[in-house]
Image: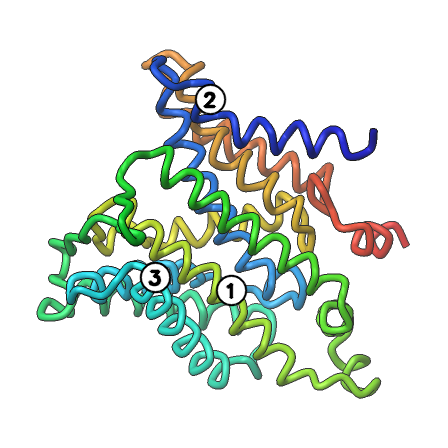
Amino acid sequence: MRRLPPFLLAAAVLALPWAVRGTHLEHLVRAGGIVGLLMLLGLGLNFTLGYVGLFDLGFIAFYGVGAYGAALAAARGWPAPAAALFAVLLCVGLRALLGLTILRLRGDYLAVVTLGFGEMARLTINNLDRLTNGPKGLQVPALRLGPWLLAANWQFYYLIMACVLLVAAASLRLENSRLGRAWVAIREDEAAAELSGVAVGSLKLLAFILSAVPAGLAGALFAYWEGFVTPESFVFWESILVVAVVVLGGMGSVPGVLLGAAILSGAPLVLQACLSPEWINLRYLFFGATLVACVIFRPQGLWPSRRRQAELLE
């Protein structure tokens, strides 16, 4: 019986495209795909912010790098799996270079530097006309997996959800491993962890690098799904949204991150549908007030990890 609710939730996720097929609710499938992309980004940031406590305000830059990496590789005739792999490796390489440079910083200083990097990445993409076509963006060829052409929203929905499932399963395995416990020790007290023999520097760098994998994958999926990428898709607001997903859902909690992504993606759509046109611009006010209330009354997140919840209660 304890497994019944997750089973029902999984069944609902799988049945959504078929349940709304041919109805005016088909847009829910596309909304579900967008939620899935935000889940991937949230799971990626959870490695650094959730497990290690590193505030990264420029995470969306790697989403953009993944999207442009896949778009550039696809434009040169690379198969989709190779283009997606190139996008992920490009993100991992850049993330490693950035981590080696800035991970000695802590707290506010790290947040400010990552914020600056995010804006630098967006401006670089925007001004590299010969490579990225600047503000005009890049066209991305259709996604082909062998003989199959993926173009419909429901096809991307299932592909994105499969990736979410794989990344979530890998995150849970890491969370309960010795590596996951070492990350949590660093988050709680870096100095004490170092005195206990934990290799703080290399483990922080590893978490920083691993977080780039879901971001690059999400960027590649986004590029193929939209068929077009521009720098305006990777603005600072998107980084804040991903941070809010992790904080609202529960730092270090995989189910919490998935729940946070579902709420933060779905709430604007619900408010837009419920509010009359003259009140539509106030939806962000309601949205922000809801976030503030959650932070005040649920500081550990809506679905905190048991370990972090016990620490806060102490």
Q: Residue at x 59, y 43 (%)?
A: 258
Closer to us: 236 or 132: 132
Circle 3 Cα neighbour tier, 10 Å, few/some/many (<14 / 14–19 / ≥20): some
Q: Which residue is mark 3?
A: 81
Which mark lies nearer to you, 3 or 2?
Answer: 3
Residue mark closest to the camera, 3 vs 1: 3
User: Which marked residue is nearer to the observer: mark 2 or mark 1?
Assistant: 2
Amino acid under disc 3? Pro
Q: Residue at x 33, y 70 (%)?
A: 86
Label 1 packing within 10 angstroms: few (<14), some (14-19), many (20+): many
Q: CA distance from mark 3 to mark 2?
A: 35 Å
* Tag 3–tag 2 contact (CB < 8 Å): no
Please state, as top left, top right, bottom left or bottom right, where the N terminus lies in the image. Answer: top right
Quadrant for residue 179, please give it: bottom right
The tag on residue 274 is none
| Residue type at numbered disc 1 | Asp
